[in-house]
Amino acid sequence: MEKKLLVVLVVVGLCSTVALAFDPMGPPAAGLGKGKSSIGIEYIWNKMEIERNLTSWSDAERTPKLDPMHKIYANLGYGLADNVDVFARAGAAWADYELSANYDWELNGSFPGFVFGGGFKVTLAEEPGVKWGFLAQYSWGQLRGHADIGNGDYDGNWDMTLDELQIAFGPAWTAAQGLVIYGGPFIRTLRGYEEFSWDGDINRHAISDENWLGGYIGLQAEVAQNCAFNIEWMMTADDMAGAVGLVFRQ
């Protein structure tokens, strides 16, 4: 009965008013143990709608899309205590930027940018088969691409910087030996800027994402001794994302 209730809570958290997280999260509770370490690789695909802070006279679209955006990370983790893990990640990101105005824009993400971040996980409570935990993580990323504006009238580049903070809470339920189902609600903030440059001119605007309350669900499975694979799905009223990862523990 308790296990069924936990599954219901995760599904409710996912289907309520949600927003997209742009970095993988994994189980929200600590799982390494004191003095233990891990190394892994993570990939996330997402479709994201952002808010542009434009001048009142601009006819350009105020809610363009990064469709799709990709990130790939290397991740290092360490157990500070039996109930506290810390981690750091670094990698690359690239995206196609969809933007429209009264003239034609053709934008792509042919130049991979650098991304890095880190965070921690804390186990708050534990009972047979279930851990309840909390995680917080931050990332900084830069996206770059080519901009062909007005069918060749302007040929230049675009550059976008993003600062993101994610905080999540929820259960990690051991459904079977070597199989964990996890998820729950989270909040996030996103701030940054976009910059277009061509012929010596630079056009710069602040950007943000007003979606801040979210939910996610994931599955982690042991595929070999001290090696686990995980897959996650995240949604928002406007956005969606999927992530996969492989982690090796000491």
Image (tube, grey):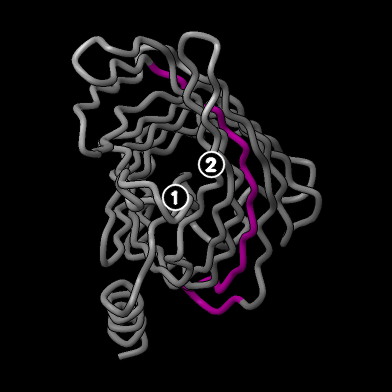
Residue 127 appears in the rendering? yes
Tell me residue 96's x, y (percent): 29, 27
Callout 1 touching callout 2 (CB < 8 Å): yes
Q: Quadrant of the C terminus?
A: top right
Give the secondary structure at mark 2: strand
Using the image as rendered, state which of residue 239 and residue 170 is in the foreground.
239
Give the Cα distance between marks 1 and 2: 7 Å
Left or right? Give the position of 249 relative to 130.
Answer: right
Left or right? Give the position of 243 relative to 238.
Answer: right
* 248 is higher (above) or lower (below) than 214: above
* 93 is higher (above) or lower (below) than 131: above
Residue 137 in the magenta stretch? The answer is: yes
Using the image as rendered, state which of residue 76 and residue 72 is in the foreground.
72
Tell me residue 67's x, y (percent): 26, 37
Q: Which residue is mark 1?
A: 52
Mark 1 or mark 2: which comes first in sequence?
1
User: Where on the picture, by quarter, is residue 141?
Assistant: top right
* 128 is higher (above) or lower (below) than 30: below
Q: Which residue is mark 2?
A: 205
At 41% across and 65% down in the image, what residue appears?
183
Q: Quadrant of the N terminus?
A: bottom left
Please report the bounds of the magenta region as a residue range: 126-145
* 6 is higher (above) or lower (below) than 1: above
Mark 2 is surrounded, within 10 Å at the Cα level, by few (under 14), some (14 to 19) or many (20 or more) other residues, namely some
The kind of secondary structure the magenta stretch mainly shows is strand
Residue 68 in the magenta stretch? The answer is: no
Tell me residue 214's x, y (percent): 41, 69
Tell me residue 113's x, y (percent): 51, 20
At 65% across and 67% down in the image, what residue appears?
123
Amino acid carrying label 2: it is His
